[in-house]
Structures are given as structure tokens and as C-alpha cells.
Amino acid sequence: MRKIKLSENDLDTLFKEATIEAARLKGKKFMENPERDPFYPSAEFDNRIQLLIESKTKKSDTFEFFNKAFLAYSKVAAWILLALLFLFVTVPNVASARNWVTKLVMDSNQKYVTYYFQNNETGFFNQESNQNGLFPDGMYYPSYLPRDMKLVQFIYKESTMTYRFRDTEDNYLMIQVNSLGTTTNVDNENLKEQIFVVVNGIQATYSSKAGMRSIIWCDEAHLFIVDTTLPKEECLRIANGLTN
Amino acid sequence: MARPTNPQVNAESDRLFLEMLYDNYNRLMFKHARRYFQDQTDVEDAVQESFERLIRYLPTLRRLNRNTLAVYIVNVIRSCSMDIYRKRKIEKETNFSDIFEGFEETLVDDFDPDCLMDSLLSMRQLAQVISQLPEKDQFVLEAKYLQSWCDSEIAEVLGTKENTVRTRLFRARNRALQMLLRGRHEED
């Protein structure tokens, strides 16, 4: 006789095959017996099983709806994400984006623009900053302002630009820049003081009346007016700080 | 191994297969369920629960032929019925005596399978011997090799520990080999 040695795996495989073969023989007997034992389940039970099969094999409409909804939501979310990414890459922040749009509007529509500053924007002019990112190139703006002086109104017309400031002590400051050819009325009656001063190397007229101080001067292209309730020295510093 | 798959089977072919399964095997299912329950409602519950469980084993069922599928179904009926008994806290040893009989028996485990290795083991002979094994041994062999249940699943069905399942499997195999050896000696 041939000597063989079966490994555990071989024995396992052999038992598997033998068990399935034994099951086949056993099953054959099972399948013969029901024929001798006629039994018909009730129609109601058949129906239950049929419903069970359908429920297990039918694709759920609700599930499908949620799948579609999720897909649509994903697409929308992806587009929003892309748009936000584009916005954050091209424009550093929303405020500068708005400034940029404002500048475009002011450049393209110089007939009439009135801009009321918000609280967080008025602080911009109080930092003695010389940034004028808000305005179109060439626009005059005050590079010096006394502390707490806040811009409350800005009017930009075709040939006239007016800044109005106010501080916590109710001091008032108005700066007006007109293009040449613009007419303006100057009250020079009963003046308390009227002298010549030099602003940025240009001769200017300083006058005071009833607590108001004014400096008026002009260069080749503009007529400048500074009106304020502040002292004379501050008025001069503001006038000298007007730049573009 | 053949862990229950996603019950949400959805192919048309699955539906047709399940309908065929019920049409061909419902009488077998009812016949075996009636071995464990007297009341018609209980029988129907057992069959329905078994059918739901069969759906979970659909990929395995598709690979079986007509007769082995019958044994598979009968075993599922039996394990479902045991589950129902367990849930209802009914003494199950009476109705499942073929499974639990001699469960704690002492068996000589010093049988060495190598003593059979001097002759070629025939699969058909072994199958014949397995057919003659007690029902409890056949059940554990079928659960392991036909149903492809893992030890923990078999343990769950039998309400025992995994170690016990492994012991029962080991003993069932040894018993089959012993019977095979005894048969050969008688032939000689």
C-alpha cells in the first residue's frame, strides 16, 4: 500500500468536499420527501413572502431621492467653493473689493457721486495715514487730520470734491477741491483777520470770522478751500497736508 | 467567511432567484419548521425569518446545486427555529435533541489521524461515513464546510462558545475517520 501523509489543510479540503457530497446525498432525500408530504402554504403567506422579496430587491425611491439631492448639493457646494477660492485669490478681502468697485464707479461716473462713510471707514482718515486707496488716482485728500476727526460726508461732483469732518468736541472741518473755472462765493465782510500765508510753496489767503477759519489758494489746475473751527495752526497743518 | 451581505439586494436576477427559491423549497421549509413548532403561526414565523436570513446569504446560495441547497435551507430553518426558542426562552433540548444530544459526552480524543494515512483516503467513502454520523456531528460539519459559517456564527446558532464549536468539529471529524477505519478493518 502507498504511504501518504496528509497535511491539516489537505484533510480540511477533503472534509469539505466530503461534507458537500454528503449534503448532496442528504438533500436528494429531502427533495424527494416533500413530494410525499404535500403542503401548500396559504395564499396570504405567499403574498407576505412576495412582498418581502420585492422590498429587498426594489430600489428605494427615498434612497434614490436622497442620492440625487446629495449629488446636487455636492455640485452647488463645489461651485461655491470655487467662487470663494477665486474671490479670495483675486481680492485680498471684501472691503478692498468694495473699495475697488467704488473707485471704478467714481472713475466712470464723475458727474455726481456722494459717499457716506461707515463708522469703520471714518477711522481710516484718523490714523494720519497717507493711503488713498479708496479714491481714483490724482484725487486730493488730507494726509494730516487732528485726532478724533472723522469723515462724515464725501461729495464728488464733476468738478468739485468736498470732504466734511467732525470730531467728538463738535469741531468742524470742510475741505473743498475745485477744478479751475469753478465759481465759488467767499464771504470777506467783517473779517476778524485776513493775512497771506504759504501753503506747499504757494501763496494762500487765511481769514477768520465768527470762530471759523479759512484758507484759500490755487495751483495751475485746482482751487482749494479749507474751512474749520479748529485753531489757525491746525488749519495751516491741514492745508499743508493736502496732497494727491 | 460567508458573512451576511447587504440585505438591500437590488438586481432583477436576485428577485427571480428568490422567487424560484421560495417556489421550489417552500414545502421543504414548512416541513422542517413543523418539526419544531406545532402552531401554524409559529411555523410561518420560522419560515419567514429563515427566508430573510437566506436572502442575506444569497451569493453563497447561488453557488450551490439543487440538493445541497436543500440541506443549506434545512440548516437555516433549524438555526432560526433555535433562535426563536432562545428568544422565547423555551427549553430547546427536547426539540433539538439531535443537535444537543451527548453534547458533554467524553470522547477519546487520542485518535491519531495518521493511522489512516497508510491508505488513500477516498472522498466518496468519507462522504458515506459523514452521512452515517449523528445529526449533531453532521450539523457542525455542514455549518463549517457547506454553510461556510465561521466559528463565532456557529457558536451563536448553537448558543455555545467558539472553543466548544472547535472541539465539536474536531470530534466530528475524528469520529468520521474512526468509522472509516473501522469499516476498512471489517472489510479486511
Image (tube, coloured by chain):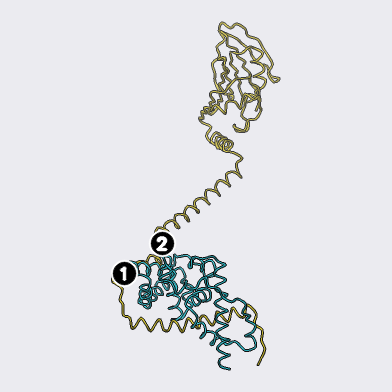
Chain colours: A yellow, B cyan
Q: Position of residue A160 (x, y in %)?
A: 55, 25
Instruction: Please indicate, yes or no, whether residue A38 appears anywhere in the rendered image.
Output: yes
Viewer-closest of A42 and A64: A42
The residue that disc 2 covers is B89
> Looking at the image, can residue A50 be seen?
no
Question: How many numbered discs?
Answer: 2
Callout 1: 10 Å neighbours few (<14), some, many (20+)? few
Residue appearing at x 45%, y 82% in the figure: A26
The kind of residue on which mark 2 rests is: Lys
Q: Is residue B117 left or right of residue B18?
A: right
Q: Quadrant of the N terminus of chain A?
A: bottom right
Q: Chain of mark 1?
A: B
Above or below residue A162? Residue B25 is below
Gap in angstroms between the C-alphas marked 1 and 2: 19 Å
Q: Chain of mark 2?
A: B
Which amino acid, mark 1?
Answer: Gln
Q: Which label belongs to residue A95?
A: none
Q: Determine the residue positioned at 43% across, 84% down.
A: A28
Residue A229, given in percent of the width and then of the height, sits at 58, 13
Please, which residue is most extreme toward the front here? Answer: B106
Reading the image, the residue beneath label 1 is B40
User: Which quadrant of the figure has residue B173?
Assistant: bottom right
Q: Quadrant of residue B167?
A: bottom right
Residue at the extreme right of the image, as rendered: A201
